[in-house]
Image: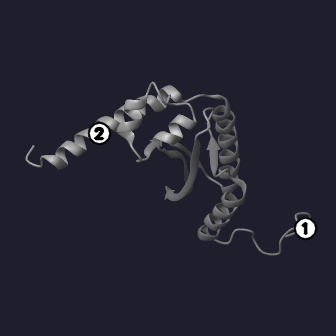
Amino acid sequence: MDYLTHPKKPALISHLSAKMQADQWTQYNVINTITDGDGLKWKVAINSEEKIADQKRLLITTISFEAHASGQDLVATRTLEKMQDARLISLIGNRKIPFILKPLVFHASTVEEVHRMVSLRLNAYKKEFCVRSLSELKRKWIGIWIDRQKRFDELLADPET
């Protein structure tokens, strides 16, 4: 489409086409992964949902961040030390620990506003992630994950409890 000439038909015909256009834009213009300061890669997922309330259209967009790391991944990113954290690494085994950050949620009334907000927020997060170490936070999550796994394993071993 030539951007210097006006289209003969409206660019957005319906809500469905607006959502499709937003999804297509997101697919080509959005970061799929972000690497934190430690070197762990996080998946970025963007979901957009349309709600109509009081005759007004509202687009609710959620940006979520998720990573899965094994013991070797955590050693490679220096979250865990091979010698000092040998017990933790053995408890993790070859399983992957899920790390999930609280999602970003924002509201917009137009597709263009969604595009602008997604770009701004993701660029800001990318800049912050690149320089920030999340090692302490990941170590806390590892402890919580191990506690939950141990409780679950105990329940499987003794179902009467």
Relative side of 146 to 129, left or right? left
Whole-angstrom CA distance, mark 1 to mark 2, is 60 Å
Q: Secondary structure at mark 1?
A: loop
Mark 2 — residue? 148
Q: Is residue 155 left or right of residue 123?
A: left
Q: For the N terminus, which image quadrant?
A: bottom right
Residue 13 location in percent, x, y?
Answer: 67, 72
The residue at 58%/49% (across/down) is 44
| Location of residue 111 by image quarter | bottom right
Viewer-closest of 42 and 6 = 42
Residue nearest the observer in this picture, 111 or 31: 31
- Label placed on residue 5: 1
Q: Is residue 65 above or below residue 20?
A: above
Indicate the amino acid at tag 1: Thr
Q: Is residue 100 left or right of residue 11?
A: left
For the point 56% across and 31% down, the residue is: 78
Instruction: Please give the name of the residue rendered at 10% of the width and 43% of the height, measured from the top-left corner.
Output: 161
Q: How is the image coloured?
A: one colour
Q: Position of residue 5 (x, y in %)?
A: 90, 67
Q: Amino acid at mark 2?
A: Arg
Q: Can you tell which quarter of the image residue 142 is in?
A: top left
The residue lying toward the viewer, choosing from 9 and 21, is 21
Residue 66 place in picture, x, y as percent: 51, 46
- Indicate the secondary structure of the residue bearing disc 2: helix
Q: Residues within 10 Å of mark 1 (few under 14, many from 20)?
A: few
Mark 1 or mark 2, which has the lower sequence index? Answer: 1
Question: What is the x, y in percent for residue 94?
Answer: 41, 47
